[in-house]
């Protein structure tokens, strides 16, 4: 089965938007608040996932 590049690009865009929203929520929290710490960790994980997905897209477009 071939990769659906348009679907992957759409998911990448959605992931970027989600990461931004999570980051905004994290920024609104007190730095020592447990929820804020968890949101910042989630944001880092989403950023790593976004980089990986971007890499997959670039490789597939070659």
Image (cartoon, grey):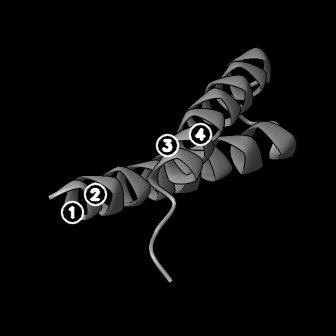
The residue beneath circle 1 is 59
Q: Which residue shows up at 46% across the image and 69% down it?
A: 3
- Cα distance between the residues tagged 3 and 2: 11 Å
- Can you tell which of label 3 and label 2 is closer to the viewer? 3
Q: Quarter of the image holding residue 53?
A: bottom left
* Disc nearer the start of the sequence (3/2): 3
* Residue at x-position 64% and y-position 27%: 17
Q: Looking at the image, tell me whether mark 1 or mark 3 is earlier in sequence order.
A: 3
For disc 3, the marked residue is 9
Residue at coordinates 49% horizontally, 43% vertically from top-left?
A: 9
Mark linked to residue 55: 2
* Sooner in the amino-acid sequence: mark 4 or mark 2: 4
Occupied quadrant, residue 26: top right
> Which residue is nearer to you in this view: 40 or 52?
52
**Quadrant of the image occupied by residue 15:** top right
| Above or below 45: residue 3 | below
Q: State which mark lies toward you, 2 or 1.
A: 1
Can you see residue 44? Answer: no
Question: What is the distance, in whole Å, between disc 3 and disc 4 at their CAs?
Answer: 4 Å
Q: Residue furthest front?
A: 1
Residue extending furthest toward the left: 62
- Mark with earlier residue (4, 1): 4
Mark 3: secondary structure: helix
Give the secondary structure at mark 2. helix
Picture coordinates of residue 41 (x, y %)?
62, 51
Q: Are marks 3 and 4 in contact (CB under 8 Å)?
A: yes
The label shown at residue 10 is 4
Residue 30, horizontal then vertical, whole percent: 77, 23
């Amino acid at each position: 089965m071939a990769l659906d590049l348009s679907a992957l690009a759409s998911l990448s865009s959605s992931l970027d938007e989600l990461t931004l929203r999570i980051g905004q929520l994290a920024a609104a929290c007190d730095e020592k608040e447990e929820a804020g710490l968890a949101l910042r960790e989630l944001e880092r994980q989403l950023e790593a996932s976004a980089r990986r997905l971007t890499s997959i897209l670039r490789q597939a477009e070659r």
